[in-house]
């Protein structure tokens, strides 16, 4: 297949011919003394060949569709005639046996008239060539036929001559002459050779020609790379590597061209790709030459630069123009509005239109923007955004674009000093001219670009100190940096804060990278995939790479693999991209106390949390805890979820939370249980305060687990609006109950559940009440905490009373009262008795209001034997009776297991805070 298509000589884009025609180009050095061993001496000059009448072009073309160019037009369209003529032209003036022609046309099953049909085809070709003014060329010779061709009449011969000229030029050190000859030779090809001659015999004869063509293309690209034309040939080399991934020479050319274009990372990635292909397809490693090239690129060897050409006649050579920007992504799907604003702000003074931007990157009139900072969390797409911005601005900075990437987590002056050394080398300074020390290099760097319009891009700047050393000294230059930190640059700095794309934008990214049709076929799974990746562009790029590497996978298959939280971070790793490594780079730079807090935040029941949680988790004073938490915010590992309308709340996103959980597993085994116990005690302290402020009675003096001491301001937040505090923290409180139950902190568990019941009752949040109590009931029964179980049954009985579940309330409250009497807890006995009295009053009023059935007397359910009486009723609600013995028996009852598992899941209430009494009453009345 063709990798380089060019118009025929003489057409648009054909290279200029050297000399006055083919006859002059291909003549021997001395026509009077021809070489007796040359092919020319064995070829006869046929009659009728008139180069002047054919424009000096080859008369016969086989490097494409078969074509005859005579003084008059001639068409060879019949299949047999095409095959016969192709065999004659490829025979190199040697006879082609008749049997070979028969086999080429019909294969192993020729008809009985095959010879006669071949003779007929030959006669037709003779007549056609004579009518075209090409004379009598086809002759019978022995048992076959031959065609008389002069040198240069067949384009394949002309191709070979040009290739020989190009190779001689290379041997003489004339790369430009070699390139011209090679390009002229390649221009003779106009598609697949002899594409109309569908014969295996003919195509077999062309295998060598096709191989020579690719060898010439590779030699031509080598010559062009020697000439420093890496920018011009990069696209052609990429196409060649894509079509022939197992040819090693183009792979090396691609690596070298990418490196010389300032795209070292892509050059190294190209090596990894070709190595993987060789290992997977051939089971072989790349050659030592390619391996040495890889090492040279890795080390930035100066030997990889193109050889200098002849010295210019001027006294001073011009300063080089560096073009060091990395490659652009194929489809940029980031924030186009922010990109446009930033481009306007940075290009303002260069185009004569001073433009400024505010701290968010929004354009305003005013002072020009000289420095721009693109910041955001790890994996949010800062590098892609910066590269796209730089390429959009490249035309406005014709004096060059400098690019460097600082190592992740590298602080201090040394990394910046190394970057400045690279920049100065790119600007033409020798090693001897570059001073030592950051300040000296920064001064020389500013002097070198002072009168230039240069764009400087530096990634992973860690702090303001590193930024200051990179700022240009004149307004003609621009500096664009990326950072995870919120940097405070000099006056007039534009800051672009990149956030996680929306789900819709994430799906668009997937479609651009993995294929629109593939994503459109599974839209729901694509949305799930975006959510499982937290919308992070880096994670989406990894997911798309995995899908591209496995075309037989559906999107849903990858989504199912990511749903396993234990494996999600492992799954998000592909081709050198790794979410875990990206997060680890940010984590490892944290102070030790911040790493401890980061890990323990993953143990909280909810991803969202308040600032006060840091103090009990670390067991430090609130001010210190706040500083540590803000260090996590600065590192972009913790988000500020809401801080505009009240006290700030924070969030640990999904992938970050999974990474933090891995760090928590690495901490000392006894450290986390103590921190968790302090956290549960803090929840109890705040819940008690909320209950007290709502007019309730906290349980602090009744079976009290340890409460944590909190700062007065935190408690005052609860006192200000206890109902609002509960609305904000209800999910976290319910999660704390689950956490306590699973950890075996039974006392904390049931005390928290009772507090939730007291806080949920005024707001009619019956689901919170029932869910927390079901979890706590499972915990107390597992540990045989009889007081906790009785207290929970009492609370559930009050919930049943509120929902008008008279029989269930009666059974639970009587069981709780019996347990309290056995345990001798007077306070709890009084509470249970009061609840039963309330039950009797409300049930009596309800019975009095109920209309009597005509012809019958009103009957209380308690008086009805069988289904509604005594043991039957108590067994239905998980209680065999009100005695202590029956209470113990209830522990293993099946209904109790149902309560622990999922109580009242089958009840559906209308929207709103109030329960649906009609539906509940109808269930109880049945």
Image (spheres, rainbow, N blue to C red):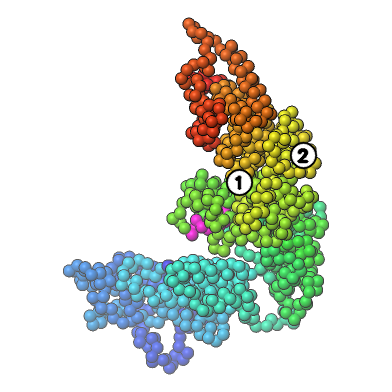
Label 2: which residue?
715
**Magenta segment includes 702:** no
Q: Which element type, helix, strand or loop, lies under badge 2? A: helix
Q: Which residues lie in the magenta part?
A: 540-549
The image shows residue 308 at horizontal and vertical percentages of 64, 81
Which residue, as the protein is rendered here, is positioned at the far top? Answer: 855
For label 2, the crowd category at 10 Å Cα-Cα, with few meaning under 14, some 14 to 19 and many 20 or more, is some
Q: Residue at x 21, y 72 (%)?
A: 115
Residue 445: which quarter of the image? Answer: bottom right
Label 1: which residue?
743
The image shows residue 289 at horizontal and vertical percentages of 52, 79
In the rendered view, does 696 fall on the left or right side of 533?
right
Residues at marks 1 and 2, CA–CA distance in whole angstroms: 26 Å
Q: Which element type, helix, strand or loop, lies under badge 1? A: helix
Instruction: Specify whether residue 528 is in view.
Output: yes
Position of the N terminus, as image quadrant, is: bottom left
Q: Residue at x 48, y 6 (%)?
A: 855
Compare residues 45 and 258 and report the one nearer the observer.
258
Residue 839: which quarter of the image? Answer: top right
Check contact, mark 1 vs mark 2: CB within 8 A. Answer: no
Q: Residue at x 53, y 76 (%)?
A: 290
Compare residues 30 and 168 and report the one nearer the observer.
168
The image shows residue 65 at horizontal and vertical percentages of 39, 68
Asked if 602 appears above or below 313 in the picture, the reply is above
């Amino acid at each position: 297949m063709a990798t380089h298509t060019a118009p025929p000589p003489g057409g648009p884009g054909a290279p200029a011919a050297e000399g006055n025609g083919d006859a002059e180009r291909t003549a021997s050095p001395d026509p009077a003394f021809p070489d007796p061993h040359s092919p020319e001496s064995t070829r006869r000059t046929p009659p009728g060949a008139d180069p002047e009448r054919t424009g000096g072009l080859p008369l016969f073309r086989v490097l494409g569709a078969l074509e005859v160019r005579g003084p008059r037009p001639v068409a060879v369209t019949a299949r047999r005639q095409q095959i016969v003529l192709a065999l004659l032209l490829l025979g190199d003036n040697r006879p082609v046996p008749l049997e070979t022609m028969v086999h080429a046309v019909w294969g192993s099953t020729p008809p009985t008239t095959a010879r006669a049909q071949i003779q007929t085809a030959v006669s037709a070709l003779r007549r056609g060539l004579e009518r075209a003014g090409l004379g009598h060329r086809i002759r019978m010779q022995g048992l076959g036929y031959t065609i008389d061709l002069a040198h240069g009449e067949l384009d394949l011969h002309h191709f070979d001559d040009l290739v020989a000229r190009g190779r001689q030029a290379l041997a003489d050190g004339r790369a430009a002459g070699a390139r011209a000859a090679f390009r002229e030779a390649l221009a003779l090809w106009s598609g697949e050779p002899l594409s109309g001659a569908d014969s295996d015999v003919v195509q077999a004869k062309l295998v060598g020609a096709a191989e020579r063509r690719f060898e010439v293309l590779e030699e031509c690209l080598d010559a062009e790379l020697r000439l420093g034309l890496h920018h011009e040939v990069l696209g052609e080399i990429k196409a060649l590597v894509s079509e022939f991934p197992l040819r090693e020479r183009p792979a090396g050319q691609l690596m070298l061209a990418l490196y010389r274009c300032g795209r070292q990372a892509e050059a190294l990635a190209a090596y990894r790709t070709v190595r993987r292909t060789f290992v997977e397809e051939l089971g072989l490693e790349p050659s030592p030459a390619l391996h040495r090239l890889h090492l040279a690129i890795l080390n930035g060897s100066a030997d990889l630069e193109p050889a200098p050409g002849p010295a210019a006649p001027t006294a001073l050579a011009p300063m080089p123009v560096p073009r060091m920007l990395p490659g652009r992504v194929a489809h940029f799907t980031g924030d186009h509005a922010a990109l446009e604003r930033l481009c306007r702000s940075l290009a303002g003074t260069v185009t004569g239109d001073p433009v400024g931007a505010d701290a968010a990157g929004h354009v305003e009139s005013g002072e020009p923007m000289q420095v721009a900072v693109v910041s955001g969390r790890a994996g949010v797409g800062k590098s892609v955004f910066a590269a796209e911005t730089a390429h959009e601005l490249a035309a406005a900075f014709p004096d060059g674009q400098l690019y460097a990437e600082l190592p992740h987590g590298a602080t201090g002056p040394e990394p910046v000093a190394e970057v400045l050394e690279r920049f100065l080398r790119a600007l033409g300074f020798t090693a001897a001219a570059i001073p030592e020390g950051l300040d000296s290099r920064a001064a020389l760097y500013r002097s070198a670009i002072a009168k230039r319009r240069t764009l400087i891009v530096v990634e992973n700047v860690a702090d303001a100190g590193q930024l200051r050393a990179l700022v240009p000294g004149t307004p003609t230059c621009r500096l664009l940096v990326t950072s995870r930190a919120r940097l405070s640059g000099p006056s007039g700095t534009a800051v672009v804060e990149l956030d996680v794309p929306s789900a819709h934008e994430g799906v668009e990214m997937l479609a651009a990278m993995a294929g629109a049709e593939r994503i459109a076929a599974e839209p729901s799974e694509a949305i799930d995939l975006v959510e499982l990746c937290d919308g992070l562009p880096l994670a989406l790029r990894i997911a798309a790479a995995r899908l591209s590497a496995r075309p037989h996978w559906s999107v849903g298959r990858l989504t199912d693999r990511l749903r396993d939280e234990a494996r999600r971070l492992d799954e998000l790793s592909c081709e050198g991209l790794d979410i875990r490594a990206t997060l680890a780079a940010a984590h490892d730079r944290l102070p030790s106390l911040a790493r401890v807090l980061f890990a323990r935040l993953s143990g909280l029941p909810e991803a969202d949390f308040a600032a006060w949680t840091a103090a009990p988790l670390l067991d430090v004073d609130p001010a210190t805890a706040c500083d540590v938490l803000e260090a996590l915010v600065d590192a972009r590992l913790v988000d500020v979820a809401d801080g505009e309308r009240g006290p700030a709340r924070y969030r640990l996103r999904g992938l970050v939370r999974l990474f933090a959980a891995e760090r928590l597993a690495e901490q000392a085994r006894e450290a986390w249980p103590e921190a968790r116990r302090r956290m549960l005690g803090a929840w109890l302290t705040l819940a008690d305060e909320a209950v007290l402020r709502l007019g309730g009675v906290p349980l602090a003096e009744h079976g009290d687990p340890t409460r944590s001491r909190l700062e007065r301001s935190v408690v005052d937040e609860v006192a200000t609006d206890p109902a609002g505090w509960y609305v904000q923290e209800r999910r976290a409180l319910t999660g704390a109950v689950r956490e306590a139950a699973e950890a075996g902190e039974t006392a904390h568990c049931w005390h928290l559940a009772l507090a939730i019941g007291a806080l949920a009752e005024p707001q009619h949040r019956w689901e919170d009440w029932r869910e927390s109590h079901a979890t706590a009931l499972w915990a107390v029964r597992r540990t045989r905490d009889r007081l906790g179980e009785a207290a929970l049954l009492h609370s559930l009985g009050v919930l049943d009373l509120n929902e008008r579940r008279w029989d269930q309330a009666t059974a639970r409250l009587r069981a709780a009262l019996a347990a309290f009497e056995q345990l001798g807890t007077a306070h709890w006995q009084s509470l249970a008795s009061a609840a039963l009295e309330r039950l009797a009053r409300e049930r009596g009023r309800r019975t009095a209001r109920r209309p009597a059935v005509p012809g019958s007397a009103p009957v209380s359910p308690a008086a009805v034997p069988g289904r509604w009486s005594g043991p039957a009723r108590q067994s239905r609600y998980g209680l065999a009776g009100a005695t202590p013995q029956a209470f113990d028996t209830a522990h293993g009852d099946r209904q109790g297991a149902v309560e622990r598992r999922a109580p009242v899941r089958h009840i559906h209430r209308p929207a709103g805070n109030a329960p649906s009494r009609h539906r509940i009453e109808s269930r109880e009345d049945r």
